[in-house]
């Protein structure tokens, strides 16, 4: 259920980010909630025989340590509540679920010095009330979660009436919507309804569709404010006075959120000088998990994205194209790259490993494309069969290029030319597909022995065309070994960095590889893809 919640956040992350206007319009709520949830998943035990009680304790600690941003720390309250609600019992019930949300609500209100209604806190509280009433009538988990899933969306819909800044921007609360999305994914997993991660329509108060565009004057005004730095860190000590720490952070910064559990406290605060918060934190214990983000830069990027969304919304219905391209991809960098490479003819459908779009999803994307002639790039070997079904379900002329990876898809897209016929494009793009070798670098989620390679949980390993070529402790080392194994026959190598790799490492990675492989043309590009530290295209 937790993994399904992550899939649901992945499917709706861009929408959640677009809604993010409070407390800072920096467009990272969906990303922070997803990264927090991935910390929970990474900390999950491999032993599936463990009781709900044991697992709940583990994930509560993982959620607190891995919490990202304001929304991530508030989300961690739910997992802490889950642990408290289950107690010493071994199975999860509807009563436990109701208690976990009540605990999350009470703890979240306490974690903020100045809690604000119309936010994720309100959604927690209202969901707790409906869950408790439902569990009193029928403690079945599925029954309680079904009622809460409906209430969560209704609660989100009411948030603009409680928080004026949401009404001003004409959006609903992003964190509350993120929680509603998570409950939907978990419930679908419990009921066995696929896909677990589906796109959910934003419950706008007036019943209209949310297009991703924000009221123009609000976007402009958001860039005029000085937001400072989002500063997040953990403190470890045998004894921590969490209330004192919370008041201290509220005195020296803004939007302070502080909570603790079993010798660990997690701090989120907005500061003009992040060093001041870190220095203050040292007085309480040892610091770890330090993250500092420039909110002025994030707010500027958010505003730019919202303007682009608005322009796209206004022009999409007006502009028809001779040929349109629909490509499947996951990751903001890869999506931006695909759109720009496609010369304005390309739209991106979110999907990939762990989230394969259905035939219906692909058909909908093709029907929405601004042309009667469409090239479809599935960009994943598991999505190709579904893509091949689309041709017979639409009156449009659809050509499927069987791209087995997003790296192959980008290479094929470089051959796209909107001034020639669909037949010529199909031939040119098909020709390049067989010339690209696909490499991937990721971390093992469990111990495994694959084709003679002993891979332990947490280790990095690289595959090339699905064969394991290198294993090691450091993803960059494994990436280097992968390229080394293919250097003799390679002319051009493109590396796409994942969301787990800091953006500032893109340039240093490029310099490292260029220095080591001077005879090969190497380009390192930010991809932002989940699951994989690096994706590699070898030509």
Image: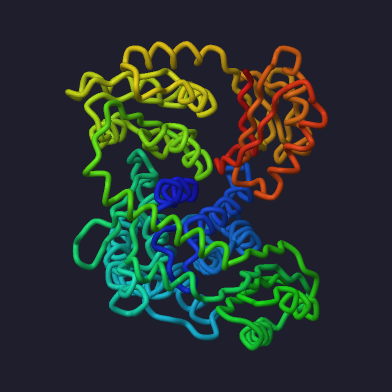
Q: How is the image coloured?
A: rainbow
Residue 352 at least partly seen: yes
Q: Position of residue 451 (x, y in %)?
A: 69, 18
Q: Position of residue 203 (x, y in %)?
A: 27, 61
Picture layout, residue 150 above or below residue 7: below
314 to the left or right of 409: left
Picture layout, residue 515 above or below residue 204: above
Residue 82 at least partly seen: no
235 to the left or right of 149: right
28 to the left or right of 276: left
Q: Position of residue 516 (x, y in %)?
A: 82, 29
| Residue at 21% in and 19% down | 392
Q: Quadrant of the C terminus?
A: top right
| Residue at 32% in and 12% down | 423
Picture layout, residue 398 above or below residue 504: above
Q: Residue furthest front?
A: 419
Picture layout, residue 431 above or below residue 221: above
Dividing the picture into quarters, in which one does residue 220 lie? bottom left
| Residue at 39% in and 37% down | 348
Q: Position of residue 268 (x, y in %)?
A: 62, 72
Dividing the picture into quarters, in which one does residue 169 lie? bottom left
């Amino acid at each position: 259920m937790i993994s399904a919640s992550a899939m649901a956040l992945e499917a709706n992350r861009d929408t959640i980010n677009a809604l993010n206007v409070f407390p800072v319009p920096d467009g990272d709520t969906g990303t922070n909630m997803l990264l927090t949830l991935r910390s929970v998943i990474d900390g999950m035990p491999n032993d599936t025989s463990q009781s709900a009680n044991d697992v709940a304790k583990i994930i509560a600690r993982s959620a607190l340590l891995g919490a990202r941003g304001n929304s991530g720390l508030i989300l961690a309250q739910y997992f802490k509540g889950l642990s408290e609600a289950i107690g010493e019992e071994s199975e999860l019930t509807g009563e436990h679920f109701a208690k976990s949300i009540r605990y999350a609500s009470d703890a979240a209100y306490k974690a903020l010095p100045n809690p604000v209604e119309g936010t994720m806190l309100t959604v927690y509280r209202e969901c707790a009330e409906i869950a408790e009433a439902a569990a009193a009538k029928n403690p079945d988990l599925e029954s309680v979660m079904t009622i809460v899933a409906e209430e969560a969306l209704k609660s989100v819909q009411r948030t603009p009436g409680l928080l004026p800044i949401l009404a001003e921007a004409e959006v609903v609360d992003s964190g509350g919507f993120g929680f509603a999305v998570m409950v939907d994914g978990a419930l679908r997993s419990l009921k066995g309804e696929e896909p677990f991660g589906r796109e959910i329509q934003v419950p706008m108060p007036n019943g209209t569709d949310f297009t991703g565009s924000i009221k123009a004057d609000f976007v402009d005004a958001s860039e005029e404010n000085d937001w400072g730095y989002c500063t997040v860190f953990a403190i470890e000590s045998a004894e921590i006075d969490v209330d004192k720490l919370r008041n201290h952070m509220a005195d020296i910064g803004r939007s302070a959120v502080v909570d603790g559990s079993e010798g660990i406290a997690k701090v989120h605060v907005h500061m003009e000088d992040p060093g001041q918060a870190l220095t203050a934190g040292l007085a309480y214990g040892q610091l770890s998990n330090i993250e500092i983000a420039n909110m002025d830069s994030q707010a500027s990027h958010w505003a730019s994205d919202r303007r682009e969304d608005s322009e796209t919304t206004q022009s999409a219905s007006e502009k028809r194209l001779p040929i349109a391209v629909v490509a499947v991809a996951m990751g903001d960098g890869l999506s931006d790259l695909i759109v720009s490479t496609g010369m304005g003819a390309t739209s991106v459908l979110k999907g990939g490993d762990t989230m394969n779009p259905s035939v219906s999803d692909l058909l909908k994307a093709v029907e929405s494309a601004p042309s009667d002639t469409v090239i479809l790039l599935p960009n994943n070997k598991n999505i190709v069969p579904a893509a091949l079904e689309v041709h017979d379900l639409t009156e449009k002329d659809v050509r499927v290029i069987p791209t087995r990876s997003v790296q192959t898809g980008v290479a094929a897209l470089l051959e796209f030319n909107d001034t020639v016929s669909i037949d010529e494009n199909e031939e040119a793009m098909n020709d390049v597909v067989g010339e690209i070798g696909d490499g991937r670098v990721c971390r093992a989620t469990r111990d495994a022995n694959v084709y003679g390679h002993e891979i332990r949980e947490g280790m990095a390993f690289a595959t090339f065309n699905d064969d394991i070529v290198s294993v090691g402790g450091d993803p960059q080392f494994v990436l280097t070994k992968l390229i080394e194994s293919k250097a003799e026959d390679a002319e051009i190598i493109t590396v796409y960095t994942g969301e787990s790799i800091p953006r500032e490492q893109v340039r240093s990675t490029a310099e490292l590889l260029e220095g080591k492989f001077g005879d090969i043309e190497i380009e390192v590009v930010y991809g932002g893809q989940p699951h994989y530290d690096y994706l590699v295209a070898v030509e």
